[in-house]
Amino acid sequence: MVEQEFAARGIEGHTSAEVDKVGEDAVRYTDGTARPFDLLIAFPPYVAAVDHPDLPHDDRGFLRTLSATRQVQGHPQIYAPGDAGDFPVKQAFLAFLQADAVADHIDTVVALELPYRPSPFEPVSMCVTEMPDKATFAQVPLEETRDPALPVRASADAGDLYRVGTSPLWRLGKKALGVYLPVRFRAGRPFPGGRPWQAMQLALDGMCRTLATGPS
Ligand SMILES: Cc1cc2nc3c(=O)[nH]c(=O)nc-3n(C[C@H](O)[C@H](O)[C@H](O)COP(=O)(O)OP(=O)(O)OC[C@H]3O[C@@H](n4cnc5c(N)ncnc54)[C@H](O)[C@@H]3O)c2cc1C
């Protein structure tokens, strides 16, 4: 989908190109190639903002966790949902899902009278990338590979959950989420749950069916 959008705008994309060095007017890649630039816009490397030297962490400082519950490995009383943990993709929607898994796990640990309802973290990335005229929606179930070169990939058995699409209407979808989420958070409620979330899900589902497709 991104390749199509790039092609429509005359943008040449190169994936899997790992930067080795940035010079004054060219970037060199680990495969020996180089590309010149007039203006370079770059992401900083993903590294943890806060060090926790006494807790297990990966080489970027992210806390090593048990995938399903986001408990820090060897420290069952400490949770690391969101960017602080070692899930390879850092995204708000994934952070929400992890926070929910943590809350449910604390429920089962602290409020022992509750029936046990395991709801482990299942990584599904959902994002809307805005463009001036329209937006691209992507919902991608992910799986960790444990390969440092490619630590995460689209889940092989994603089925109907894998959806992408481009349309001006997705800008409305993003605005709807932008209204819904702050209302829930200000009310101290988790983002999924209740009638508003069911309505949001129905709307998203309807839009997915009409505006997005699975992988071709
Ligand atoms: C420029 C940018 C654009 C992004 N765009 C998107 C996007 O379009 N879609 C998307 O899904 N995600 C996006 N992300 C990623 C998303 O913002 C993060 O994945 C998400 O905010 C992670 O949530 P979190 O709660 O784990 O961490 P954070 O949102 O970083 O929250 C951590 C909080 O803890 C506070 N804190 C730190 N140390 C302490 C301390 N010692 N005591 C008290 N408080 C402390 C911090 O100030 C911060 O408020 C973007 C990120 C960036 C930087």
Image (cartoon, helix red, strand yellow):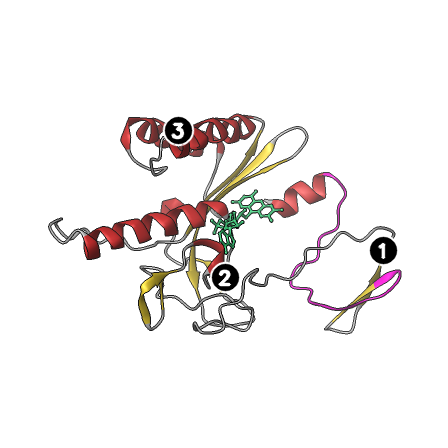
- Please, is residue 114 above or below residue 144 in the view? above
> What segment carries the magenta color?
9-26
Which residue is denoted by mark 1 in the rendering?
37
Which residue is denoted by mark 2 in the rendering?
88
Percent position of residue 208, x then y: 43, 34
The secondary element bearing badge 2 is classed as loop
Question: Magenta region, mostly helix, strand or loop?
Answer: loop
Q: Nearer the viewer, mark 2 or mark 3?
A: 2
**Residue 17 sits inside the magenta stretch:** yes
The secondary element bearing badge 3 is classed as helix
Q: Nearer the viewer, mark 1 or mark 2?
A: 2
3 or 1: tag closer to the N-terminus? 1
1 or 2: tag closer to the N-terminus? 1
Which residue occupies 65% across, 47% down?
3
Q: Within 10 angstroms of label 2, few (less than 14), some, or many (20 or more) residues?
A: some
Distance from label 2 to label 3 (Cα)? 30 Å
Toward the viewer: 178 or 12? Answer: 178
Percent position of residue 1, x then y: 59, 44
Type of amino acid under label 3: Gly
In-image side of 132 versus 94 (left or right)? right
Percent position of residue 167, x then y: 57, 30
Which residue is denoted by mark 3 in the rendering?
206
Q: Which quarter of the figure has residue 47?
A: bottom right
Percent position of residue 168, x then y: 58, 27
Toward the viewer: 61 or 86? Answer: 61
Which residue occupies 45% across, 66% down?
63
Residue 196 shows in this picture: yes
**Residue 61 sits inside the magenta stretch:** no
Type of amino acid under label 1: Phe
Type of amino acid under label 2: Pro
Q: How many marks?
A: 3
